[in-house]
Image (cartoon, rainbow, N blue to C red):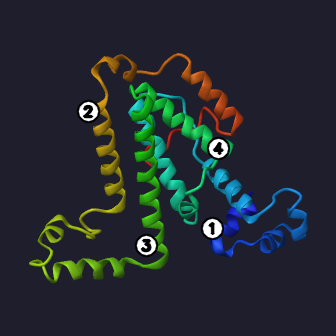
């Protein structure tokens, strides 16, 4: 999968073909079809492969774990800018599922169940995917000057766009992408806190006795080590 990820990072999804993947591996394209059926299969495997870059730490306080995972997911998607555009179909690889399990386990310790758990998982995933997709697309197709031009277009006519002008819309000097992402994460978690019944407080304060063993098994199964430090400072 390293060869496929390297091609995708350099050429994007449209630049990946079975022929050039075979060339990079010094095999024939026909040989690849002994292992995969289509280019889409390669993309699914590559997508799952990059999620293995997110280490699974020992579970701690539930909100800390959610923040860690969301920041690490975003960092992976930005390192591999083809990846956000590929999301939109079920991805059932072991790395993705193990990290989704880690997320829902943390949310469950925070007191979320049933529909509330499903909705919050959906909100968090869309926040990461949407943020990464916009940032990756902007970096690929534009640059700092394009954003400055967009901001000048707003400030040139403050009477037409008074709220956008005052709020700093598209002003990277006022609100950068990292801060916007983290404030969005704050808002989702704050709404989660407000919606969880107080009777579940005891389940939100710590880590249940079963969870660490379950995630230790997941780490061993998918290549992450328990002594890998959390990248809570990652974007």
Residue to which mark 4 is pinned: 95
Which of the two labelled residues, at mark 4 and mark 2, occupies the earlier sequence position?
A: 4
> In this rendering, is residue 167 above or below 99?
below
Identified at 29% across, 68% down, the residue is: 172
> In this rendering, is residue 60 above or below 84?
above
**Disc 4/disc 1 C-alpha distance (Å):** 19 Å
| SS for callout 4 | helix
Residue 33 at what x, y percent from top left? 86, 62
Location of residue 92 (image quadrant): top right
Binning the other alpha carbons within 10 Å of mark 1 as few (below 14), some (14 to 19) or many (20 upward) gives some
Location of residue 204 (image quadrant): top left
Identified at 13% across, 78% down, the residue is: 160
The answer to whether one can see residue 154 in this image is: yes
* Closer to us: 112 or 16: 112
**Disc 2/disc 1 C-alpha distance (Å):** 40 Å
* Closer to us: 186 or 127: 127
Q: Which of marks 2 and 1 is in front?
A: 2
Residue to which mark 3 is pinned: 138
The answer to whether one can see residue 235 in this image is: no
> In this rendering, is residue 108 above or below 48?
above
Location of residue 89 (image quadrant): bottom right
Residue to which mark 1 is pinned: 9
**Disc 3/disc 1 C-alpha distance (Å):** 16 Å
């Amino acid at each position: 999968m390293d060869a496929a990820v390297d091609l995708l990072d350099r050429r994007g999804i449209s630049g990946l073909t079975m022929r050039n993947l075979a060339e990079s591996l010094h095999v024939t394209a026909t040989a690849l079809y002994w292992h995969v059926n289509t280019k889409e299969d390669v993309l699914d495997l590559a997508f799952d492969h990059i999620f293995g870059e997110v280490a699974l730490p020992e579970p701690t306080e539930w909100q800390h774990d959610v923040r860690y995972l969301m920041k690490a997911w975003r960092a992976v998607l930005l390192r591999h800018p083809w990846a956000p555009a590929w999301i939109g179909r079920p991805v059932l690889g072991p790395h993705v599922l193990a990290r989704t399990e880690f997320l829902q386990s943390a949310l469950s310790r925070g007191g979320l169940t049933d529909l509330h758990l499903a909705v919050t998982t959906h909100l968090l995933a869309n926040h990461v995917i949407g943020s990464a997709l916009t940032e990756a697309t902007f970096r690929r197709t534009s640059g700092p000057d394009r954003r400055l031009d967009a901001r000048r277009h707003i400030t040139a006519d403050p009477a037409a766009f008074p709220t956008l002008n005052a709020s700093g819309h598209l002003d990277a000097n006022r609100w950068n992408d990292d801060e916007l992402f983290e404030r969005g994460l704050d808002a989702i978690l704050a709404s989660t806190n407000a919606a969880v019944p107080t009777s579940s407080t005891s389940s939100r304060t710590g880590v249940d006795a079963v969870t660490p063993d379950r995630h230790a098994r997941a780490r061993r199964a998918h290549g992450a080590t328990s002594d890998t430090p959390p990248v809570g400072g990652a974007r």
